Structures are given as C-alpha cells and as structure tokens.
C-alpha cells in the first residue's frame, strides 16, 4: 500500500520520465486501454440488469441494442484503440482474424493483442471477470499491420496487463520494470496506485485447476495434484484448492498470496484451453516481473513463438518453486512422482 494518492496517468508519466528510452508512446496506448476498462466496468456493474433489459428488447443509452458483454467489451476497446493513431493492428480473442485500423485513422508503431472479457461464463453469476492485454512493437515496416505483427513471442512484449472487475476493480500492469496495481475509485473515475511493486511469494499454499478434467490428465499431472493434497508438515501440504474459473481472478489471487495455476493439456485437448497470445503470454510477463514463473510444462511461455492467432498452450503459472516442482512431476523427475500413490 502507499500513503500518497497517485493516479495511473501520473504514474505512467513518471515512469516515462524515469525511463525515457523504455517507455515511448506506447504508454499512451496503456492509458487508452484504461479508458476502455472504465467503460467496460460501467457496463459490468450493471450486467445483472442486462437480462432484465434484454428481455424487453431494450436499447442502451447510445440507442444500441443490449449486447453480450464480451462483444460489448471487444467493441468498446476497438472504439478507443481504433482512433488513437498509435497502433498498426490489433488481435482480439473475439475475432477470427486480425483487426486492421480504420482507413481514416493514422497508422502507428504498436500492436495490441487482447482478451476483452475473460471468464465470461461467470458473468451471469456475478463472479469476477477480467480483461487481459499485451502491447508489442510492430515488426512490419509501414502501412497496415500484418498477422506477423501479432504473432510475436511473449518476450517481445513492451507492456502487459489485466483489469479485474469485481468487488473493487483493479488494473495491474508491467512494462518490464516491476508490476504495479491500481484500484479504481468510481467517485472520481480514476485508477489510483494501491499495489506498487508487487512481488509474488517464492512458494504458495494454493493450487488452482479445473479438476473436473482429472481423468483426462497425464500421469505426471495427476501425481502432482495428488501429491499437493497429501499431508506433509515439512513441505506445507496439503495445499488449498482455489478455483474461480476466471483466469484473471485466479491469477490475481495467486500473484498476491502465492500458489500455482494449472491448465494442462489433456487427452482431449493436448494444448489445453488457454490462448497463448491473449492469456498465457501477457500473464507470463506479469508473473515473471513479479518474481514468478510461467511454463507450458517444458518451456518458458515467454519463449514460445505463436504459429496462429488463437493457438492454445498448456499453462503452469505462479510461484517459481511451485512451477519448477510441477515441471519436475510432468517430466517424471520429481522424487514424489514415483511414490506409491495414496488412495
Ligand atoms: P474466456 O472467458 O476468455 O473464454 O476464458 C475462459 C478461460 C479462463 O478464464 C478460465 O481460467 C478458463 O477458461 C476456465 O476453464 P474451465 O471452464 O475449463 O475451468
Ligand atoms: Mn479468457
Ligand atoms: Mn474472453
């Protein structure tokens, strides 16, 4: 916590002054995303009314028909980003192909990949949802950006962040100089610095996974989770199971408390469920900047070169000692991997 009031804009400007070589104009893109997040937040807090209003075929204040929140979030981000002049191209989880900038807008140097609304199956139950974003430098030289601009390895990111819409709404981001969290103050419409320099514990006591998929998991995966549940005072087991089912919410909790988030590949989906560009890579950048780790089970997520926009990847994310241990179980090299399993 901090004893001064610092808005997101003030903080970003200060970072630019401190690191003029690193920041550049993309910090403007970050502030634009924060603006879109405020708009999405305004819709999210009224989400419970959408069905009520929708049932009457109602239109919203802009005269548009009430639409699904993830489409609304996508459109809102596009409306803000499309006119900044700083972007060459964007890719969204909600769109099959890349989204070019409007013809009447200037073309810029940066690329944004984003998941407009993460955890959308939780919307109707009033459970936390989020937005995830990743800002990259373009690699194409001029004109409209290309799909190759979007398909860059995570280590090329200039900035990554997420917004968590919930009891209080937060924006957390990194530009490669630590991880900083801001809490939204709706009375003044500002994100205020509340969590400077977030560090994640080296080891946690929480695991987060959809264990409904257990029967399809590999032997190594099953043994790891079985092992986490065994009693061992020396190593602090059993771990607690915590799973919201919104990646942003599960990640945010584990970032602060320590722990591991798991979404492995399985017999039905060898690459798991989560998308490399919109979910895995940005959260990997944040995790590493907070002292955490992110792996696909064998390799660092940040080093994976995406082959297509909606490519999926297994994800093991969180406290570094936990991620390392999980990798050892998957490789069959952890001493616990060959222990006789308890019933
Ligand atoms: P999205 O709502 O953007 O499609 O993402 C959903 C993701 C992620 O938020 C969450 O961790 C995961 O799907 C949950 O998957 P399960 O339903 O298999 O648990
Ligand atoms: Mn998602
Ligand atoms: Mn989504």
Image (cartoon, helix red, strand yellow):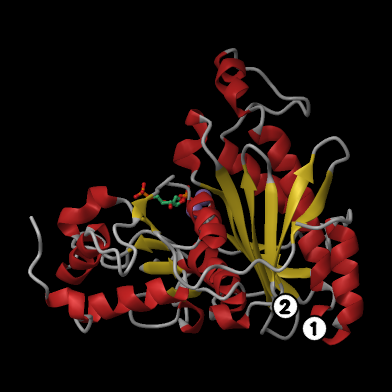
Which tag, 1 or 2, sits closer to the chain's start?
1
Residue 242 place in picture, x, y as percent:
40, 49
Residue 123 place in picture, x, y as percent:
52, 35
Residue 50 place in picture, x, y as percent:
60, 24
Report whether 131 appears left or right of 93: right
In this view, 240 is above or below 54:
below
Report whether 176 appears left or right of 240: right
In the foreground, 194 or 161? 194
Q: Does any portion of residue 343 appear in the rendered image?
A: yes
In the foreground, 335 or 182? 335
Which image quadrant is residue 85 in?
bottom right
Q: Name the residue that disc number 1 marks.
A: 22
C-alpha span from label 1 to label 2: 9 Å
In the image, farthest residue toward the front: 233
Near mark 1 (Cα within 10 A), the count class, few <14, some 14-19 or many ≥20, is: some
Q: Nearer the viewer, mark 1 or mark 2?
A: 2
């Amino acid at each position: 916590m901090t004893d001064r009031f610092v808005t997101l804009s003030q903080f970003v400007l200060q970072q630019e002054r401190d690191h003029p070589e690193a920041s550049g104009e993309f910090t403007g893109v970050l502030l634009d995303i924060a603006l879109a997040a405020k708009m999405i937040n305004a819709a999210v807090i009224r989400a419970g009314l959408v069905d009520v209003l929708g049932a009457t075929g109602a239109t919203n204040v802009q005269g548009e028909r009430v639409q699904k929140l993830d489409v609304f979030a996508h459109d809102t981000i596009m409306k803000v980003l499309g006119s900044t002049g700083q972007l060459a191209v964007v890719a969204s989880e909600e769109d099959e192909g890349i989204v070019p900038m409007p013809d009447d807008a200037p073309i810029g140097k940066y690329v944004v990949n984003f998941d407009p609304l993460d955890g959308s199956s939780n919307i109707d139950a009033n459970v936390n949802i989020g937005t995830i974003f990743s800002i990259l430098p373009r690699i194409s030289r001029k004109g409209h950006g290309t799909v190759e601009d979007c398909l860059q390895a995570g280590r090329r990111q200039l900035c990554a962040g997420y917004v968590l819409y919930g009891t209080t709404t937060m924006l957390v981001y990194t530009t490669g100089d630590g991880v900083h969290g801001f809490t939204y103050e709706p009375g003044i419409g500002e994100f205020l610095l509340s969590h400077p320099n977030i560090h994640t514990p080296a080891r946690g006591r929480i695991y987060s996974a959809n264990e409904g998929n257990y029967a399809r998991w590999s032997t190594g995966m099953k043994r790891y989770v079985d092992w986490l549940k065994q009693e061992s005072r020396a190593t602090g087991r059993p771990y607690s199971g915590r799973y919201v089912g919104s990646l942003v919410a599960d990640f945010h909790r584990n970032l602060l408390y320590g722990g591991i988030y798991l979404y492995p590949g399985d017999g039905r989906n060898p690459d798991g469920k989560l998308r490399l560009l919109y979910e895995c890579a940005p959260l990997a950048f944040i995790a590493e900047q907070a002292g955490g780790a992110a792996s696909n089970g064998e390799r660092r997520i940040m080093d994976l070169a995406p082959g297509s926009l909606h490519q999926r990847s297994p994800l093991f994310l969180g406290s570094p000692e936990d991620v390392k241990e999980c990798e050892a179980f998957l490789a069959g090299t952890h001493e616990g991997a060959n222990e006789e399993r308890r019933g």
